[in-house]
Amino acid sequence: MAKTSKKKEPSEDSHNNPSKESDSIPAGIPADPTAHGGVDRIRDILFGGHIEEYDQRFQQLKADHDSKYQELKNSLEQRSEEIASDLNSKADDLQNKINEEANQRNAAFENLSSDLANARQALTDDIEKTTSDLTARIDQLSAAKTDRLLLASLLREMAQRIEQAEDSSENK
């Protein structure tokens, strides 16, 4: 971590007593750290020979970070592709099931339609047969009724003749 340094405001004492400020700076370092590569010298004093080690560690951490980042990115891309493939597969399976069910329902509908048409035809045939049978029975009953009427008419005529014959035999 980088240390932040705050620039001290010179106090009135430091203006009056310049030896106090120079007492805190080691010998050989200029009072103005920015003068003549002073920053580099301060860094050398603070970190000394460890700066290269810190740079190497930083580079290694950066490389490790980049490597982990790339691994994670590749893993996420692979997982994303697997999920997309799985979703596509499941969507295809669902579409196939829907198509299969639709085909089954269409076949069932066609079977029901065929059964209904057959039942309608059978019912029509039964109605026609029943109507025909009923018409034949009505005709038979009409014929029987006609025969009865004819018989009744004949019997009346015979009765009249018998009456006339009796009346004519009594008158003679």
Image: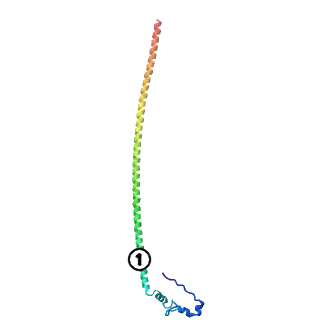
Q: Image point 46% across, 11% down: which residue?
A: 164
- Image x and y of residue 50, in percent: 43, 85
- Image x and y of residue 15, in percent: 59, 92
Sort mark 1 into few (<14), some (14-19) or many (20+) by Cα contacts within 10 Å. Answer: few
Q: Image point 42% across, 38% down: which residue?
A: 123
Nearest the viewer among 31 and 91 is 31
Tell which residue pokes out farthest to the right in this image. Answer: 12
- Image x and y of residue 143, in percent: 42, 25
User: Which element is circle 1 on?
Assistant: helix
Q: Seen in the image, is 44 located left or right of residue 18?
A: left
Using the image, determine if residue 169 lies above or below residue 122. above
Residue tagged 1: 64
- Image x and y of residue 25, in percent: 52, 91
Using the image, determine if residue 19 lies above or below residue 154. below
Nearest the viewer among 6 and 136 is 6
Nearest the viewer among 63 and 122 is 63
Q: Image point 41% across, 64% down: which residue?
A: 83
Tell which residue pokes out farthest to the top in this image. Answer: 172
